[in-house]
Image: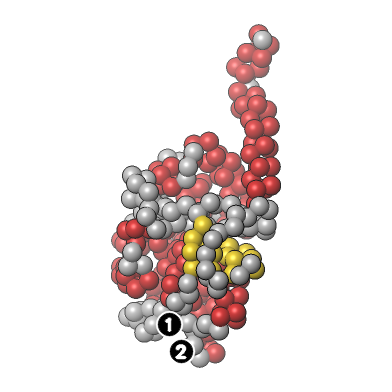
Amino acid sequence: MEQLKSLWADYPYYVAGVIAAPVVFIIIHKIRSRSSKIPKVDCPPNTVVLYQWPRGPYAPSMSNFPIKLETYLRLANISYVNDFSGLPSPKGKLPFISYNGEFVSDSQFSIEYLNKKLDRDINKSLTKEERAVAKAIQVMVDEHLYWTFVYARWIHDKDMKIVNLGIPYAKYVTWLIRRQCRSALYGQGIGRHTKDEIAHIMLTDLQALSDYLGNKPYMMGQTPCEVDCSVFGLLAQFIWNSSDDISQNVVQDKFPSLYRYSLRMKEKAWPDWDDCITHGATRPAPK
């Protein structure tokens, strides 16, 4: 016992890691084993089941991708029900969907699947050139700007006020999520930069969005399309679900046109917004 106390005094993080490792392994094992046991949701035929995280504190999800996908379902007028169990797909991803027993992982693959399966196309007003531009913007948002926000939330924000409101038992798992995010950010490349450089990347991407939006009501013109689902999903995190000094208020203060755009999208696709958030974890979201 004295040796253990001495070891703890000299190497507290090492000892804590050794003690915690089996617990973390068990948790991860259970999550992975449960991911293959996707719960059956009772719903009418031809209804999409959207599997996602539980509702967020000030936006409908703590992640931009469920908001992206749910916004698409609403704009495309597709019947759906939510499953908030938070269990990942067999690919280990959230969100994902099922439709009449078929499962599709990834928000973008889900949109493409439903477009083909249900013959929906909210991009129908776009020319080929406009579709190409919209695709480029979607990729910039989902695969580039997104990672700057991941850094701001999971690495830079030491207090994690929003995370603590939005994730059950956050204090027990955030260190693990932060570690995974740090590794992912380094592999992606954004994480190899300094804080100021990442903030610069964030601002230049937001400026590009603002410049392209211009005076249009939506990214590609008079009606929202698929790219608006991606853009709004991430801007919703910046505006309503951030608490760090890089991303919080940056849209409101520096890009007022994007802020007005986000309010417009919120009104268009989410008239029931207040029923889809927990109001700072003060009450369950009814929807």
Q: Residue at x 58, y 63 (%)?
A: 96
Q: Amino acid at mark 1?
A: Met
Q: Is residue 219 above or below residue 97?
A: below
Residue 145 in view in this figure: no
Q: Position of residue 203 (x, y in %)?
A: 43, 63
Q: Position of residue 127 (x, y in %)?
A: 50, 91
Q: Which residue is mark 1?
A: 220
Choose between 272 and 93: the one closer to the eye. Answer: 272
Which circle marks residue 125 in the picture?
2
Q: Is residue 160 above or below residue 88?
A: above
Q: Which corner quadrant holds the C terminus?
A: bottom left
Q: Do residues under tags 2 and 1 come within 8 Å of each other at their CB atoms?
A: yes
Along the polypeptide, which appears first: circle 2 or circle 1?
A: 2
Residue 82 in view in this figure: yes
Q: Amino acid at mark 2?
A: Ser
Q: How many marks?
A: 2
| Crowd around label 2: few <14 · some 14–19 · many ≥20 (10 Å) | some
Q: Residue at x 68, y 53 (%)?
A: 36
Q: Nearer the viewer, mark 2 or mark 1?
A: 2
Left or right: residue 79 versus residue 260 is: right
Choose between 24 and 156: the one closer to the eye. Answer: 24
Choose between 82 and 18: the one closer to the eye. Answer: 82
Q: Is residue 115 above or below residue 201?
A: below
**Is disc 2 placed on a helix, strand or loop?**
loop
Q: Which corner quadrant holds the N terminus?
A: top right
Q: Residue at x 63, y 39 (%)?
A: 27
